Image (cartoon, rainbow, N blue to C red):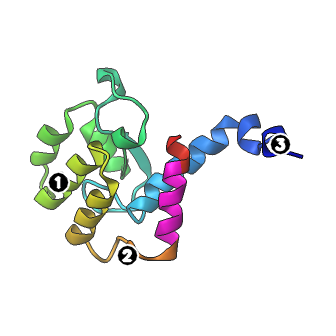
Amino acid sequence: MHNRDAVFLEDLCPKLSFRRWRKSLHTFTGKSCIYCGNPSESIDHVIPRSHGGLSITENCVPACLSCNGHKSDNEVFSWYRRQRFYDPRRAMAIRAWIDGDLRLALRLLQWAQPSHIKQENSPSSKNSEKDYFMQAA
């Protein structure tokens, strides 16, 4: 039996791959909100869908319910600069995330809050990076 003849669970249930993608986004940041550092419970579109934003990795970031709700459909940087928890390192991480440079974004988030983000050299983060590249295809 060849690989092309196999039926994969993801082919039968597309929501399964979507759930894995969402889970991998949370795993990247150590399950913390990219804006404030609290535990992430949702996915926020940096460029809101109402403004033409897509549901792709570069436009979706882990966020807590509070940040996701307060940001609503505002432009991310103008909203973030007005927050009391504004951190320029996190703002640079958001910019790197949008630009598709997840490694830089994770390093900046590590610098902003080192206790919440796992080391990049750990085996679990290497697996999550591998999942990201598989999901992006």
Residue 92 among those drawn in magenta: no
Which residue is labeled 3 in the image?
6
Q: CA distance from mark 3 to mark 1?
A: 43 Å
Tell me the mark number nearer the camera, choosing from 2 and 3.
Answer: 3
Give residue 9's position: percent from left, percent from top: 76, 44
Observer-nearest of 126 and 36? 126
Say if mark 2 contacts mark 3, CB within 8 Å. Answer: no
Q: Name the residue furthest right.
A: 1
Q: Is residue 67 left or right of residue 88?
A: right
Q: CA distance from mark 2 to mark 1?
A: 19 Å
Which residue is labeled 2 in the image?
119
Which residue is labeled 1 in the image?
92
* Residue plotted at (62% across, 43% down): 17
Q: Is residue 112 left or right of residue 78?
A: right
Classify mark 3: helix, strand or loop.
Answer: loop
Label 3, residues with CA under 10 Å away: few <14, some 14-19, many ≥20:
few
The amino acid type found where label 3 is placed reads: Ala
Mark 2 or 3, nearer chain start: 3
Label 2, residues with CA under 10 Å away: few <14, some 14-19, many ≥20:
some
* Residue plotted at (13% across, 55% down): 86
